[in-house]
Amino acid sequence: MADLLTLENATNLIMLCFLQAVLGFDNLLYISIESQRAPVAQQKQVRMWGILIAVGLRVVLLFTMIQLLGWLSEPFFIMEWEGVLEGGVNFATIIFVLGGIFIMYTAVKEIGHMLSMDKLDHDVDGKSSKSATQVVLLIVVMNLIFSFDSVLSALAITDVFPILATAIILSGIAMLVLADGVTRFLEKNRMYEVLGLFILLIVGVVLLGEAGPAAAHAMHDDTLQIKVWGQDIIPMSKSTFYFSVVVLVAVEIIQSGYSRKLNAERAALQKHS
């Protein structure tokens, strides 16, 4: 136990908590949006149990990855269609591809629902399109997909399991505290739910980009970098992703303010006419 109480481990824990907070933003956004598909009376419990189960499984995932890191990083298939599709495929590649596709599908599907009359009638009636159990399972699965990237990044900082597990548990507590507030904000400002779905769409693209160098980074072998038509699949940097998010939020805030101003001017003109 005394070996854990070192300055290095304390510094690593602080860095890991910051990393989990930064990488957990999109996860929290997904949980807040998806939980609204459950029956209203059960939404708070859905968020709580979804996060608790997901955090527990994330610790299990972390322990498993530490034990099987070599096996998980080893490419099990090499694509050798020169000039068309090249590179190595490992477990991380599959996770990023499937996760990216599923998140993009979810975002596009929900945006489509918002544009349909069925969705509007559905909201007015107060009915739910999914059961509480279905939503909890989705939150758990997507939490694990989101966590894969953060776990791999965390392992690059330290391989001390108690420190890593503590950072994950603390991030889970933070999500429990913030999830209800984010959900209430989205419920009062429905236009920001659309913004959140477009952010999730970008997250899906980011995950697909992460699949490109997954095997190459794991094995420190550039020849395993996935190439399509001779071009490397390069992931979007985190700074670019968050800059895109800031721009989207700024545009939404400015557009909302401008719409209110126009509506006020129209109301004033109608009143005087």
Image (cartoon, rainbow, N blue to C red):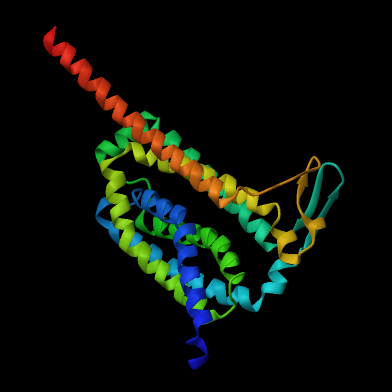
In this rendering, the answer to whether 72 lies above or below 250 is below
Residue 256: image x %, image y %? 32, 31
The residue lying furthest to the front in this view is 7
Q: In percent of the image, x 62 and y 55: which residue is there?
A: 96
Q: Is residue 160 left or right of residue 21?
A: right
Give the image location of residue 141, x and y in percent. 50, 60
Q: Image quadrant of residue 69?
A: bottom right
Outermost residue on the bottom side: it is 2
Residue sitting nearer the eye, 80 or 182: 182
* Viewer-proximal residue among 9 and 215: 9
Residue 120 to residue 162: above or below: above
Asked whether residue 203 appears in the rendered view, the answer is no
Residue 38 horizontal side relative to residue 241, left or right: left
- Residue 17, how many percent across, how many down? 45, 68
- Residue at the far top: name it: 273
What residue do we see at 45% from left, 38% from top? 247
Q: Does residue 55 appear in the picture of this structure? A: yes
